Image: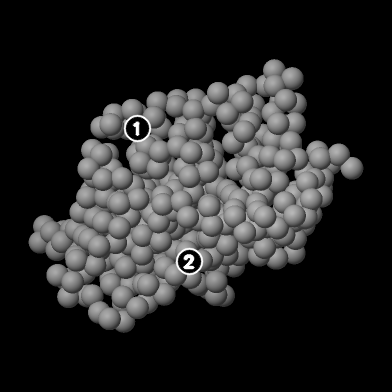
Amino acid sequence: MSDIVIGFSGLGISLLLIAMRVHIGVALGSISLLGIGLILNSKAAWGMITATPFNFIGNWTFTAVPMFLLMGFMCTSTGLTRGLFHATQVFFTRLPGGLAIASVGASALFASACGSSVATASAMSRIAVPEMLRHKYDKGLATATVAASGTLGSLIPPSIIMILYALYADTSVGKLFMAGFIPGILSALIYIAMIVTRVKLKPELAASIDTIYSKEEKIKAAKDIWPLPVLMFMVLGGIFFSVFTPTEAGAIGATLSMIIAFFRKSLTLESVKKSLGQTVRGTASIFIIIIGTSFLARFMALSGVPQFLAEGILSFGAGPYSMIFGVALLYLFLGMFVEPIGLLLLTLPIILPLANSLGVDLIWFGIIIVKLLEIALITPPVGLNVYVIKGALGELVSLNTIFKGVYWFILMDVITLLLLVIFPEITLFLPNLMWK
């Protein structure tokens, strides 16, 4: 059996195990070690078990992962994200579909704090959806707005997915954070434009709300959410002006979130314990996947699968755009049964060599990948964010209703993706301005 056949067979068996709900880190790690043993020998495979996990996880830059997780969990457990929906509601209620627009804005702010799409969808589904349904909003619009807006957590920095991509691609985490900022805002604005247009054309989708908020109420609402903009400005501003590295930014963000919570008198021993516990569990889960995919990367390199695919594409004269189209189809398919971080780490050992062989800018390519992961989170039949919202709402809204609603948002995501592909400047503008 040739190395190429072993490589493709290993990939196929790994995907089968993942589809059978075997933990992705275990599936990838075990099959990759078996494949390495077949290509080289069992001694080489055992040698990688002792060396590869430590060398990979021992990378100092990986400390950014638990630090940004801690920052996000601290913000939520101490109530720094409380009042986001109400604040955005105060400012956007008078617009057509104002509560849905408020949900997009609140989700974007929440996502910038926690860095997790699933966490954003879970939190906002309990806050925003009941409020929209109470005001007679269409169930599909209400739930789909939160499902889609939750995906902004992957694109708006700081993002755990971006950190992992940057480490695998050996590119700048800071530049990737800056690259995601404008596309993240653009995604939110395109969602809002679609909501306003749909509600104007079909007013029964969202009942108008006549509540008028006074200037004092708007000031009070703004005061309720000041911690998050300040926190994001400090973290992203420090990275942009090279005051500190992204790794240091995670620690600074976590520390600042605790300081802000302390002065707001919401920092308790219970909130600290809860945040630390969630951070440990989240980090352990991510690192198990990372170890499995580090074995996969070695397995793929030894088997020659990435080189085989690259040569095949280049022999047909395919360029970057053809490759991106192929990657998009791959992500939409695999996204049906693999969660985003697992999908990212599963595919990077294969697609990064392809991107390098075609001379693709890895910062721009990274944002394209993150956007594809966002789309996969809401794509039927297994959009993870959709199931998160269904789980939170129970029998209040049917799964079919939510999926029908997300089609409009998937269309908007495709438009955004096309803009990012056709105009790389949207992505690369801020990274090119960064202080060295």
- Marks 2 and 1, Cα distance to the nearest angstrom? 29 Å
Question: Residue at the spot x=41%, y=32% of the render?
Answer: 427
Residue pointed to by mark 1: 431
Question: Residue at the spot x=36%, y=60% of the render?
Answer: 67
> SS class of the residue under badge 2?
helix
Binning the other alpha carbons within 10 Å of mark 2 as few (below 14), some (14 to 19) or many (20 upward) gives some
**Residue 74 against residue 324 in the figure, above or below:** below
Residue pointed to by mark 2: 282
Residue 113 placement: quadrant: bottom left
Residue 3 placement: quadrant: top right
Q: Classify the position of the C terminus by image quarter.
A: top left
> SS class of the residue under badge 1?
helix
Asked whether, in this view, residue 175 is left or right of residue 286, the answer is left
Q: Amino acid at mark 1?
A: Pro
- The spot of residue 17 in percent (x, y) is 75, 60
Asked whether, in this view, residue 231 is left or right of residue 41, the answer is left
Q: Residue furthest left?
A: 216
Q: Nearer the viewer, residue 218 or 294?
A: 294
- The spot of residue 386 in percent (x, y) is 55, 61
